[in-house]
Amino acid sequence: MVCAHCGCTFKGTDSQAFHFKYEGRVAYCSTICRTAASSQKSREQAIREGKKPRKGVLTGPCPTCGKMFESQTDKVFCSLECYNKSPQFKEMLKANCKKGNERTQEIWAKRMQCVCPVCKKEFRADKSHRRFCSHLCYRKSKADLFDAWIANPQQIALPQCYDEFMLQDELPCLIEGCEWKGRHLSIHLNNVHGVKAAEFKRAAGFNLKTGLVSPDLFQELSERQKRGVAIDVVLQQKGKSNMPGKGVVRSYQSLEGKEHRRKARLLVGPGPKRVCIGCGTTFQQSTLFGRTLYCTIACRDKAYKDAGKQPAKGLSA
């Protein structure tokens, strides 16, 4: 069965299968996912009715779409899409592209000897395209570019701003009614709420490999001396099959991973010019990824109609 909240594939009970097949109900992989879906719906209903949600601040309007939105702290835009469409983001992207083009020759001359743009630490990169010395610095860079401008409603199902959330000095508990803050969120969830880390990560949209710890604790754990399994490659390979979230649950796509991919695509900039196979018009592809065949969705639909075909649901131009 497919979880209606996190989208993973799981093995449900006979009762869930009966309700899903004969009564048209949705199913959830865990209790925490059911609670997260319920809290998400109640917050969306409160925003639509113009009421103040139980957690966060109702602010706005968004300069792009003009809607009111919920955010834990004062922000300008309601979502990553609205920030992407704003003139402010386009100016920032143009300035970064210009700066990158000016330093291209210098970067290739240094090859693998790099300086982290966040902490200014010199390191030896294992890949030519690696820019940051650690994943923590990568989070700080993306948070500065994106998360300082878009809404961050800290609830049990975070829709965006994962980098900004993980860079806080103390991570707050996302369970409604709990005011705990600390350095190790996963231990608190297990000891106090009885929620497993893997279940919480799926419900809140985190990557299964993301450690729910504060930046200073992450630095301490990464610098400590490795012992036992950490230095035994054979035991590491055996342990991969026993990782949390593996086995029963499959096909999980985290919101954090989707957010990182969207940020990477936005920073790449527009793609090459293409010729529409429908009308022959030259157009600019929105990104460098893939190959767009039609200039617009209307042109694609017209070409399919003339050929007597139906375009696949959700297929882009």
Image (spheres, rainbow, N blue to C red):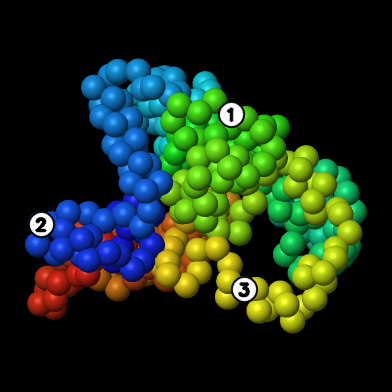
The residue under the point 15% across, 58% down is: 19
State the image quarter where residue 230 is shown. Answer: bottom right
Q: Is residue 34 above or below residue 66?
A: below
Question: Could one spot residue 304 in this view of the protein?
Answer: yes
**Between marks 1 and 2, how big is the CA–CA gap?**
39 Å
Q: Which is more toward the observer, 26 or 122?
A: 26
Q: Which is more toward the observer, 32 or 125?
A: 32
Q: Is residue 33 above or below residue 308?
A: above
Q: Residue at label 1? A: 180
Residue 277 x %, y %? 30, 73
User: In terms of sequence position, does the residue under pointer 1 or pointer 2 come before the other?
Assistant: 2
The residue under the point 31% across, 54% down is: 28
Secondary structure under tag 1 reads: loop
Residue 185 x %, y %? 61, 41
The residue under the point 35% across, 18% down is: 52
Residue 244 x %, y %? 55, 63
Secondary structure under tag 2 reads: loop
- Location of the N terminus by quadrant is bottom left
24 horizontally vs 264: left or right = left
**Between marks 3 and 1, how big is the CA–CA gap?**
31 Å
Q: Residue at label 3? A: 240
38 horizontally vs 154: left or right = left
The amino acid type found where label 2 is placed reads Glu
Q: Is residue 271 above or below residue 42?
A: below
The amino acid type found where label 1 is placed reads Trp
Q: Residues within 10 Å of mark 3 (few under 14, many from 20)?
A: few
